[in-house]
Image (cartoon, rainbow, N blue to C red):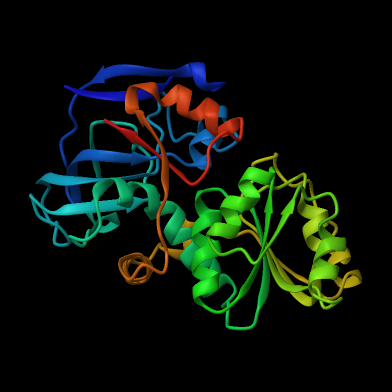
């Protein structure tokens, strides 16, 4: 048997149950992974509450982890038993053992630990596509990053600084401002209420070419108003709730703006893109340009407490669940 956190109904953290489930067997194209560490991400909350539709109930949530391949099905070529691997984006992670499509796994370099991998795959590859593909950040750019002291935010601050950009980090407390600053944010803003005014002051009126907003409803309009003409609004999360319907005429009125709602799943759907994103991430972590902060660890069986802390904005950096 395997142990897993399952939900049978949508709701608060209390709906997550620590249960015995049969150890799954890998089918064609699949691998069985004994998990050493599981990442905690806000998308897990969305599936738990029902904001994102569950494939079926009962549901094992969790999109990220790292461990060792213990068995493979037929027609598996990317990994073999004994390989150290990591993944992001395949639901079913809150378990001691899990099956996963083998082409979603990447091999871990020896220099990167299981805990570091579980803390960084989803957040780090999200940062990679946002900074390197959705908008190609270059030296001299000034960018706005919301939730700059969160898991994705701390990686983006470091990576963007490494690329030569100036980061304006938006955070919810002075303590988080100090954390974001320590990780590469040149400027920090506590609370988004005056965001456009502060961006105007910092940029001397130029505003910014891109805003990365994972907060959603509460900050959307403030983010839009921080963009320069032809700027790109990247809405990639809903921590405060989903963004209401948008009148696209507003984009013209505010400077012929661009708006995108990207997802890691699309940016890593092709195997070559997944491997490139992971290699890019492994490179900046291995060379020290990006340091992954595992600031909280919980036993996997205590995932409900981890969710409560995440939703109360009591976490910083990355949180890892240990089976």
The N terminus - image quarter: top left
Q: Quadrant of residue 71?
A: top left
Q: Residue furthest right?
A: 253
Q: Residue at x 34, y 18 (%)?
A: 18
Q: Is residue 203 left or right of residue 58?
A: right
Q: Is residue 78 left or right of residue 4?
A: left
Q: Quadrant of residue 205?
A: bottom right
The foreground one among 198 and 133 is 198
The foreground one among 187 and 87 is 187
Confirm whether residue 172 shows in the render.
yes
Q: Residue furthest bottom?
A: 139
Q: Residue at x 60, y 76 (%)?
A: 165
Count of numbered circles on the image: 0
Residue 21 at x, y = what percent? Answer: 24, 21
The foreground one among 47 and 209 is 209
The C terminus - image quarter: top left
Residue 204 at x, y = what percent? Answer: 84, 77
Q: Is residue 160 left or right of residue 304?
A: right
Q: Is residue 204 above or below residue 27?
A: below
Q: Is residue 6 above or below residue 288?
A: above
Confirm whether residue 147 shows in the render.
no
Residue 78 at x, y = what percent? Answer: 17, 61
Q: Residue at x 23, y 39 (%)?
A: 36
Q: Is residue 5 above or below residue 203?
A: above
Residue 145 at x, y = what percent? Answer: 64, 60
């Amino acid at each position: 048997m395997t142990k897993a956190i399952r939900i049978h109904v949508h709701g608060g953290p209390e709906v997550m149950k620590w249960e015995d489930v049969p150890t799954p067997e890998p089918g064609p194209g699949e691998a069985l992974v004994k998990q050493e560490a599981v990442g905690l991400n806000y998308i897990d909350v969305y599936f738990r509450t029902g904001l994102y539709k569950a494939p079926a109930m009962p549901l094992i949530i969790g999109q990220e982890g790292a461990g060792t391949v213990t068995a493979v099905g037929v027609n598996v070529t990317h990994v073999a038993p004994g390989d150290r691997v990591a993944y992001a984006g395949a639901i079913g992670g809150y378990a001691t053992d899990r099956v996963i499509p083998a082409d979603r796994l990447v091999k871990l370099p020896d220099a990167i630990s299981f805990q570091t991998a579980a803390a960084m795959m989803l957040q780090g590859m999200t940062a990679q596509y946002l900074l390197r593909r959705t908008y190609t950040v270059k030296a001299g750019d000034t960018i706005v990053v919301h939730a700059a002291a969160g898991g994705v935010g701390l990686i983006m601050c470091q990576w963007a600084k490494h690329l030569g950009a100036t980061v304006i980090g938006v955070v919810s407390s002075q303590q988080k401002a100090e954390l974001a600053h320590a990780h590469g944010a040149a400027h920090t803003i506590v609370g988004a209420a005056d965001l456009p005014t502060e961006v105007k002051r910092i940029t001397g009126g130029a505003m910014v070419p891109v805003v990365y907003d994972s907060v959603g409803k509460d900050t959307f309009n403030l983010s839009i108003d921080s963009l320069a003409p032809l700027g790109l609004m990247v809405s990639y999360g809903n921590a405060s709730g989903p963004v209401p319907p948008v009148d696209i005429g507003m984009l013209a009125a505010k400077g012929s703006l661009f708006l995108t709602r990207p997802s890691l799943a699309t940016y890593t759907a092709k195997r070559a893109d997944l491997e490139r994103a992971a290699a890019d991430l492994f490179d900046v972590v291995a060379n020290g340009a990006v340091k992954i902060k595992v600031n909280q660890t919980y036993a996997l069986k205590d995932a409900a407490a981890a969710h409560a802390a995440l939703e109360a904005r009591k976490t910083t950096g990355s949180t890892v669940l240990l089976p």
